[in-house]
Image (tube, grey):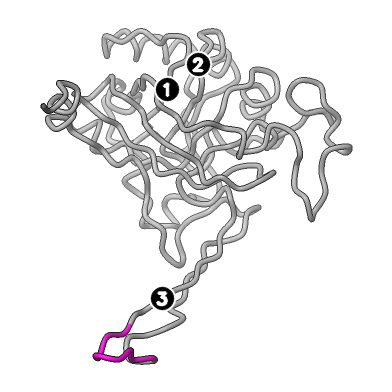
Amino acid sequence: MTPAWWDLLRQARVYDLSQPYFPGMPHYPTHPPFLYGLTKKHGDFVNPGGSSSAADSIALGTHVGTHIDALCHFSRDGVLRGGAPAEDRQSYQRGVEHLSIDTVAPIWRRGVLLDVASFVGQESLAPDFSISAALLAETAGWAGVEVQAGDVVLIRTGWGAFFEDPRRYLCGMRGPGPELDGARWLSGRSIFAAGSDTVSFERIPAPSMPVHVHLLVESGIHIIEVLNLEDLARDRVREFLFVGAPLKIERATGAPLRPLAVVL
């Protein structure tokens, strides 16, 4: 007998919230780029019976493309989340041995979309657009959602639509995002993670990266960047099941993520 939950899941809509990987894709300039090459073509080696296979190789930084930050990604005054001195727990060969990405369990949580761009009546926010606490609260009220403890909160700026145009997406490393009071609004609701469709979750340029420091170091809240939120916005999906699992890279400060939004 088919379980009732399986019948329910078969009716679900699933949204892919990740961006594609391709050579030349936009990335934050302090991280290495995505590299790709076909290392074996069909016909290079032919098996008995005539079959052959192709294979490829990739290289990328852990904060390139759609990814999630481990809590050890940032420190303040040499101290990581929880008060651990960073210098005692890191090396170029071993990585960071505290709150690294391999300690993050697969994510299965309530997701909330705060579509700021649609709320203010724009297809995409201006590069210098600041997302304040008041604006996040107003967007949530407009969407009819309440941000709750343990949620994954995704903020749409509309910039996900520019991803395959690297120059426009990076915009000289300028972009919209939350200010510190917006980050405090999120942390005040004890969320699990905050994400956006931009290359950096906070408004940039931001030399001291105060939003990253507040969320990762002070609050223990993960950050997800380079999301594709266009389909959710098109279908006016505000609440969903967020599913995602970072690559289990030992002692890494972040990892690629293939997030999904499941709507029943």
The numbered mark at residue 191 is 2
Callout 2–callout 3 Cβ contact below 8 Å:
no
Q: Position of residue 243 (x, y in %)?
A: 37, 32
Q: Look at the magenta stretch and give its main secondary structure.
A: loop
Instruction: Give x and y (percent) for residue 52.
Output: 31, 85
What's the CA distance linking mark 1 and mark 3?
A: 37 Å
Q: Which residue is mark 1?
A: 153
Q: Which residue is more in the foreground, 139 or 65?
A: 65
Q: Nearer the viewer, residue 152 or 12?
A: 12
Against 239, residue 212 (above or below) is below
* Labels 2 and 3: the sequence-earlier one: 3
**Disc 1 or 2, which lies upstream in sequence?**
1
**Image-based side of 103 in relation to 34, left or right:** right
> Residue 163, image x and y in percent?
38, 51
Instruction: Give the structural element (helix, strand or loop) at label 3.
Output: strand
Residue under pointer 3: 55
Residue found at the far front of this picture:
1
